[in-house]
Amino acid sequence: MIKLYKFGAAFGLPETGPFVLKTMAYMRLAGIPFEGIVQGDPCKAPKQKIPYIDDDGQEIGDSTFIIKHLKSKFGDPLAEGLSAEKLATGHAIKVMLEERTYWAGMIYPRWVKTDHHPLIADTFFGEIPKFLRMTIFRSIAKGVKKSAMGHGIGRHTDAEIFTLGLDDIKTVEALLGKKKFMLGAKVAEVDATVYAFLKGMSAEVFPTPIQSHIRQSKTLMAYLTRLDEIVLDDA
Ligand SMILES: N[C@@H](CCC(=O)N[C@@H](CS)C(=O)NCC(=O)O)C(=O)O
């Protein structure tokens, strides 16, 4: 059975890593069995990022390349019946959420802003003695802040960052409209990404303008409930 290496549940979420939750969601939506293993040390991962999988001794890192591997092995049932235009729409939504909204809605409020540092440090580095924990955590957070500057998101003001993130979330909300799933009545690959990122950004313990928009949106919350029913169990 495929092993999926993940961070694990925390912050009231079934999984803290949005790219892990995306991969878990994809496998559930596509009906691919897997075993989830809590192993959140990026140093052990082939690309030094979580998630990665072990498929019969072959290690593959990066959620997008994992999904490409799964599609080449098991086929692509989630694309059946979808036009090239629909699939392209799904791709554009996926890239927006993974490459921009992630930085505005998750990396910036959790790692660049300092409000939640003690909670994150205690959650991820609880095994480090308390007197050392915040020092080690701050040096990791400094590296993440540098990445946010490199990405570009870290160069904007707080208000600008949340404006960018809200633009993205409102785009997802408008594209979903009254449909059951992002591309229509049938669940598609893009729903794995949309589900994972909306779920992560809606976490109660990390209040942001983006979080409050998601939580107040009947459309988005009903969508999350629909996906929860398919995606969640005890993996
Ligand atoms: N493009 C990667 C992104 C994965 C990613 O950014 N993982 C983060 C956690 S959300 C990580 O492992 N960070 C640890 C690090 O950078 O050291 C994917 O799609 O899997």
Image (spheres, rainbow, N blue to C red):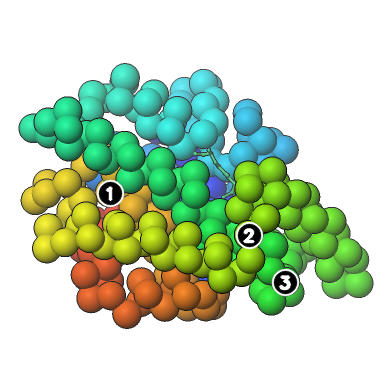
Q: Mark 3 sits on what residue?
A: 114
Amino acid type at mark 3: Thr
The answer to whether 62 appears left or right of 90 in the picture is right
Amino acid type at mark 1: Asp
The answer to whether 74 appears left or right of 155 in the picture is left
Q: Mark 1 sits on what residue?
A: 191
Where 201 sits versus 213, above or below? above
- Report if the CB atoms under discs 1 and 2 are less than 8 Å apart: no
Where 221 sits versus 55, above or below? below
The answer to whether 45 appears left or right of 214 in the picture is right
Q: Which residue is rendered at x = 27% and y = 40% of the image?
A: 90
User: Which sits in the foreground, 82 or 130?
Assistant: 82
Where 215 sits versus 173, above or below? below
Q: Residue furthest right?
A: 131
Q: Which residue is rendered at x = 70% and y = 49% of the image?
A: 149
Q: Which residue is rendered at x = 84% and y = 56% of the image?
A: 139
Query: Mark 2 or mark 1, which is nearer the start of the sequence?
Result: 2
